[in-house]
Image (tube, coloured by chain):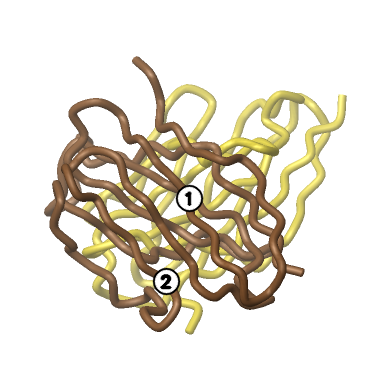
Amino acid sequence: DQQVKQNSPSLSVQEGRISILNCDYTNSMFDYFLWYKKYPAEGPTFLISISSIKDKNEDGRFTVFLNKSAKHLSLHIVPSQPGDSAVYFCAASYNKLVFGAGTILRVKS
Amino acid sequence: EAGVAQSPRYKIIEKRQSVAFWCNPISGHATLYWYQQILGQGPKLLIQFQNNGVVDDSQLPKDRFSAERLKGVDSTLKIQPAKLEDSAVYLCASSFAMGPFLLYNEQFFGPGTRLTVL
């Protein structure tokens, strides 16, 4: 069963514009949500996280929004840069991390 | 600070053969994880160790997969015998601690081992 879903396999954005990556989850037990970034031939690296008691967390160009009633979270990248091109995984945690399938972001210069 | 080390980086074997992967976590990290990432999917937890004890192996196919962390530091994941559907990237991660998720439980991932079973 897919408890964490990323319905967009890929996203293409122009440099300088906003990138919005979406994630839906089904398990109400999740209490922490994370985004990981992955470059080819490397392991995922932690990007930003949010606790279930918050609805927004910001770190520089990256902002994560959480809508608990809709069981939905999103990652906003503003402004997008070519170096942001990577696979982005949404993950949720209660006693272990459950990952979505990932979204390939391509930022065009 | 050195990251999580894994070897080999790539491995090609035939079905029914055996294979082993090695992981050395970040120094001082008590918790070690093995994930399987099949192409087009996100990483899936196979097994989690706290020091040298198993915390969670509920998703480990125990008829063919085994893992150990004898001295509470590095770890080995073995597949015997391999099947075609085991083709995947095997990721090792480590974190300082475990428990209720706090910032110090951030998982650091190694580069992975790409396994191809023919």
In the rendered view, would you say A90 is above or below A85? below
In the rendered image, the residue lying farthest to the front is B17
Q: Residue at x 35, y 59 (%)?
A: A97
Task: Say left or right for A37 vs A40.
Answer: left
In the foreground, A62 or B48: B48
Give percent across and percent down for residue A63: 47, 37
Q: Residue at x 36, y 67 (%)?
A: B66
Q: Residue at x 35, y 35 (%)?
A: B24
> In the rendered structure, which disc, 2 or 1, sits on the residue that comes first in sequence?
1
Quarter of the figure that contains the C terminus of chain B: bottom right
Which chain, by letter, is brown? Answer: B
Q: Amino acid at mark 2?
A: Phe
In the foreground, B103 or B71: B71
In the rendered image, the residue lying farthest to the right is A109
Label 1 marks a residue whose chain is: B
Mark seen at residue B21: 1
In the rendered image, the residue lying farthest to the top is B1
Mark seen at residue B52: none
Task: Say left or right for B5 vs B30.
Answer: right
Which chain, by letter, is yellow? Answer: A
What element does badge 2 sit on? strand
Quarter of the figure that contains the N terminus of chain B: top left
- Picture quarter containing residue B49? bottom left
